[in-house]
Amino acid sequence: MSDNSVIRIKPYHYIHVLDNNTNVTRVELGPQTFTRQDHEKMVSGPDPMIMIPPRNYCIIANPIVTDKDGKPAMDSHGQVRLKHGDEEIRFEKEPFPLYPGEKLMGKVSPLQVVAPNAALRLRAIRDFEDANKIKHLAGDEWLFEGPGTYYPRVEVQVVEITRAALIKPNEAIKLRARKACVDRNGNERKAGEEWLIRKSGSYLPGVDEEVVEQVKSYILTDKKALHLKASRTFTDVFGKERKAGEEWLVTSADAETHIPDVYEQVVGEVKIVTLTNRQYCVVLDPIGANGKPQLGQKQLRKGEVSFFLRPGETLEGKGIQDVHVLGEEEALLLRAKESFNDEKERHQPGDRWMIYGPCDYVPPTQVEIVEKRKSIPLDENEGIYVRDIKSGEVKSVLGALSYLLKPNEELWPKELPKAVEELLLKERTEAEQYNANEGRDKTRVVTYRAPHNSAVQIYDYKNKKSRVVFGPELVMLGPDEHFTVLSLSGDKPKRPHQIKSLALGLGPDFMTDVVIVETADHARLSLKLSYNWFFDVNKNSVEDAIKIFQVPDFVGDSCKAIASRVRGTVASVSFDNFHKNSAQIIRAAVFEASKEELLTTSQLGAKGKAATPATAAETTSNKGRNFFFSSNNLTITNVDIQSVEPVDQRTRDSLQKSVQLAIEITTKSQEAAARHEAERMEQGARGRLERQKINDEAEAENARRELLSLQAQSATVASTGEATAEAKARAESANIEGEAAVKQAQLKAEATKIKSESELTTQKLQQEAAIAHQKSLNDLELNKARELATIEAQKFNALVKAIGTETIKNIAQAGPEMQAKLLSGLGLKSFMITDGKSPINLFSAANGMIAPHVPAGSQ
């Protein structure tokens, strides 16, 4: 607000003026010059009037009250009357001011244009009657559909913009009624009811309709159907009534595409089941002719056929199965699940029978296929275990060309102890070992290849008898037979249960053991002994065959028996005697020699003439003495002493010292003999060396004499040659010096000549270059002067032409004329000062007659 008393109001502007006397505010409109009185006060302004362009509007709060003519209504005090708390929407009109109390809400806004396929959802916020005399109550809602321009009202609120839903081909939209209404098709709808609009195009939902979702259609082909379920009782698009919970299929025969109705629930898509002429299937709970499922029943369907499984129908077992094609050596084991009659006989539930090939077979629904059987080919050394399921008897079938199990037979697996399984696995060949990961086929007859010169014991638990098979032989176990597992001692010294075996080797073979013995003088020794053995058995005698298995661990027992004999014998012999005759003592102990032989052995040992081990072994062998075990016919034929070591450390050290002493004596004697021989050879070599030295010195003196003679001759030749060479060298030097001086003088003269000629040529070229340069400079100066003269002439000519002859004439006459005028201005007729000597310039005489103007303040 300005404090000036005079206020200039522009056109289309206004001010609010408060009259302090009446306390009334009025509006002054421009254009005018307003003079403010002392009792008046300008409240606001100058402000521009409100201008509403075409197709625009504004909202005025607290609008004024107008009379019938549209002019503002005044109250008794002259104040403009207002609608307090109300609003007014004003459209295109002439610019208008805001009266005191009116306010512009927001800004001037364009009218809202509603596009096609769109509408404004309007809601009445108070009761009113529109231009079409339609009464609207507060809360009513309706649509303003496009295309069109919406003119707002203060009684109406725009809730939202509703756009039409685009329905493409094979699509639909699901609508829901907000309240009871009548849809656009004239159908009455209840609150919450849903329905579909299937017609292609755009659909604008009504004010009481809302779009729930857009539903796409399912494309149905010859290989695909739609599984539907009714959520409530209704009539579908095909005009068929569906009960709540009912399920059905819609196939391509019904329609190419299907849009699920609001009461149709899509369970899933069902693919067609196609059977070839070599396939079949069994359908459980098939749909009957009345459309109802036949619960508990089965239906066999053979190809060629294609069908959809209806709701409730399922395929039994593995689904689609191939027709069973049986070859000549194949058969099917069947079992009846219920009573039925086939082409030949009647079968009761649980009956088992077989269908033999070659043929094609499709089992009826009353028959269960237990298994498919093939003829088992068997070689002469192969077999299988077969069990009769009726009697329980187990038999082994051996050596047949092929065997096909009967309906009341089945393969019987034979279980073996874990130890036997491991031993059989070790005995397999490389080809069999390749499939070792698959394990042993327990239904096959157990076979074992007995090695050469071995025996295998087999016990029949049913007949309680045992039999022995001698190798090489293929052992085949019956259903009730098992191997006798041998558990033998092993390692050194022997420990029990170290070796597991199915076959008992008959020898000859050897075994090694370590025995600790003690001599009569309490020296403990460790003996490593090796025994040769074999079983003396008659393979044709059953008693002998069984006898060799009487001792479970023949290795441990035989080693213990021999060790006891050796300990007893060694205990009666001194260490020194045993050390010298260990082989004879041990062999005599094992083979039970007489006391006289032991005494003879001791005496031989004392005299130091003991027999060698080989001689003792030959003596024993010649006498035919063996260590025979009657319990199992084991015979020890020979004993080899591999090593004898003291157990006591002191004994071992003493024995080692004695051995070292003997070695040292032998070594010293050998060293003395070698030293004597070396000295003898050294003396002979020294004599030969002295003789050779004398001969060499004589030859050296002769060579020295010849050398001196040659040196004298060489010196003579050298002095003569040196003098001759020196004279020749001096002459040659003088000759070379003279020639070099002549050559040098010639070269110097030539050099001087070349230098003079080059200097002359250089000076000549310099002078010619200077002359040419000066000539070029002169030519350039001449050309420059000529061109400058031409330019000056052209310039003067152009200047004269530009100025003109008359102008030049006037310039030439201007000086004298001005001087004449100056003289005439002074009033002098004539005036001249001269000394009579210098010539008079009549043109400049007037300039000297007038004193020049001197500025004020200058000297």
Image (cartoon, grey):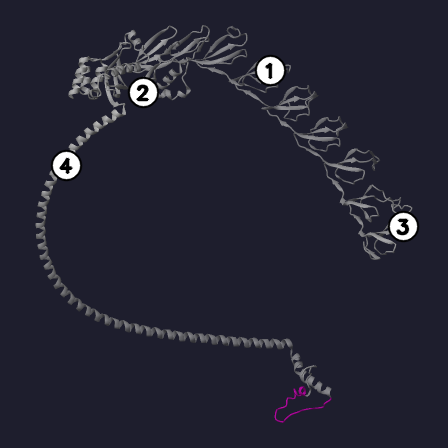
Give the image location of residue 732, x and y in percent: 18, 68
Residue 55 seen in the current view:
no
Identify the main secondary structure in magenta.
Answer: loop
Q: In the rendered image, which quarter is residue 625 located in?
A: top left
> Can you tell which of label 3 and label 1 is closer to the viewer?
3
Quote the CA–CA distance across marks 1 and 2. 75 Å
Decide whether residue 330 is among the magenta residues: no
Q: Is residue 607 left or right of residue 561?
A: left
> Can you tell which of label 4 and label 3 is closer to the viewer?
4
Q: In the rendered image, which quarter is residue 506 located in?
A: top left
Tags 4 and 1 in contact by the CB under 8 Å rule? no
Quote the CA–CA distance across marks 4 and 3. 164 Å
- Range covered by the magenta-colored residues: 827-848
Label placed on residue 675: 4
* Amino acid type, callout 2: Asp
Label placed on residue 22: 3
- The residue at which mark 2 appears reads as 491
| Camera-side residue of 253 and 781 | 781
Tags 4 and 2 in contact by the CB under 8 Å rule? no
Which numbered disc flags the more N-terminal residue, 3 or 2? 3
Residue at 71 percent of width and 85 percent of height: 822
Which numbered disc flags the more N-terminal residue, 4 or 1? 1
* Amino acid type, callout 3: Thr
Which numbered disc flags the more N-terminal residue, 4 or 3? 3
* Amino acid type, callout 4: Arg
Residue 781 seen in the current view:
yes
Which numbered disc flags the more N-terminal residue, 1 or 2? 1
> Can you tell which of label 3 and label 2 is closer to the viewer?
2
Q: Secondary structure at mark 4?
A: helix
Quote the CA–CA distance across marks 3 and 2. 140 Å
